[in-house]
Amino acid sequence: MTITQQRDRSASDDRAHLSRLHQILSTGDRAAWTTAALALVAGEPDGGSRDVPGARRDRRVAARSVLDSLGIPSELLEGGSVDRHGVAAQAAAPLLQASAVLGSGAEVWLDQPDEAILAQGRASAQGAAAFAELGLPMLAGLADLLTTPGARMLDVGTGVAALAAGYAELFPELTVVGIDVLPRVLELAERLLESSPVGDRVVLRRQDVAELADDACFALAWLPAPFVPEAALRAGVPRVVRALVPGGWVTMGHGKLGDDPVDEALTRFKTVCYGGTPLNDEEAQRLLREAGLVDVTTVPTPPHAPAVTIGRRPTD
Ligand SMILES: C[S@@+](CC[C@H](N)C(=O)[O-])C[C@H]1O[C@@H](n2cnc3c(N)ncnc32)[C@H](O)[C@@H]1O
């Protein structure tokens, strides 16, 4: 190739890269503001924007137009078929987390505003209903264990205990023990639980999963790998297994890796920002098998939900 040809080629590569860059900026702008509009409308108090003064009302009206233009009528969020506050939290969580990453450059969880932590908790609480509908039928014997009086569940990285409360609401015999390393989130959790009808069945502990010392007492343990640092996860998994009753189950959430290069890179980026452990299905299964669990498998989850790998403590 001549020097002129090389120069032309590199100019054409530059143009293609710049065009891609502008496409990403434009798609990102659109996605961020669309999600903000959704969070705003879904998060409106019942009664909508009628009583909200001036500029805030104008914003809500304009946000509704965005959703209308995308074919999402605001009535959809007002009917009973959608958990609209869950949707609002799910929409707000990535925006608030991304701005925490850009704002401080430090660890996401330590530097998030309260509303970001609450939004993430509210979004994760939807996992309890999904578990009951999709996961529970796959976990042999667990429905009986969870409905036995005195049943206990371990919620690792309990955050503001929204997920823990979700499980306690679904299973009236269940007490959920939520552990977390951050005093600030545990204070928020305590405040939320004070006004929760199931607050007396959620027990909070400031504890690192790597230091868990319970023995044979939990029917179910939830372990969110993307939020737990690798050293703590590797030290914690065998302790979680020891803390299960025989026949009890671990459900471990982890990012979906390997499906698509962009999704994989984004999942790894988010996990690094969360300070947690990226695991693909095989790595997750190995971690659970090496800790002595049986019936280890990665269960199918909806396209945008995290991967979940499960395993059972043997009964003998
Ligand atoms: C996404 S948040 C959990 C959200 C939670 N489900 C809720 O309802 O709020 C993940 C939590 O894991 C906690 N965490 C991280 N490492 C941990 C560890 N080694 N032991 C216990 N908790 C940990 C973090 O402090 C953070 O609060």
Image (tube, grey):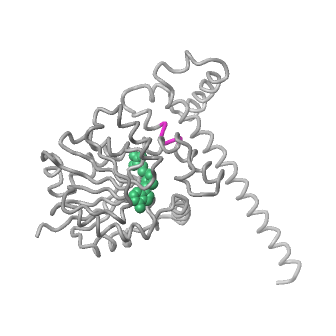
Q: Please tell me whether residue 22 belongs to the stretch shown in magenta.
A: no
Foreground of the two, 117 or 71:
117
Tell whether 1 sits left or right of 251: right
* Image height of 132 relative to 252, above or below: above
Whether residue 259 is visible? yes
* Image height of 30 relative to 42, above or below: below
Magenta stretch bounds: 88-92
Q: Residue furthest bottom?
A: 1
Residue 239 placement (x, y as % from top left): 29, 67
Q: Residue furthest top?
A: 51
* Image height of 173 relative to 303, above or below: above
Displayed-image quarter of ligand 1 = bottom left
Count the marks: how many?
Answer: 0
Residue 223, quarter of picture: bottom left
Residue shown at the point (65%, 53%) measured from the top left: 104
Q: Locate the N terminus and report the quarter of the image it occupies.
A: bottom right
Residue shown at the point (34%, 72%) measured from the top left: 287
Residue 101 placement (x, y as % from top left): 61, 54
Residue shown at the point (63%, 24%) measured from the top left: 56
Secondary structure mostly seen in the magenta stretch = helix
Foreground of the two, 79 or 139:
139
Q: Residue furthest right?
A: 4
Residue shown at the point (41%, 67%) measured from the top left: 232
Residue 129 placement (x, y as % from top left): 31, 43
Residue 253 placement (x, y as % from top left): 37, 58
Q: Please tell me whether residue 91 belongs to the stretch shown in magenta.
A: yes
Residue 246, quarter of picture: bottom left
Tell whether 149 sits left or right of 268: left
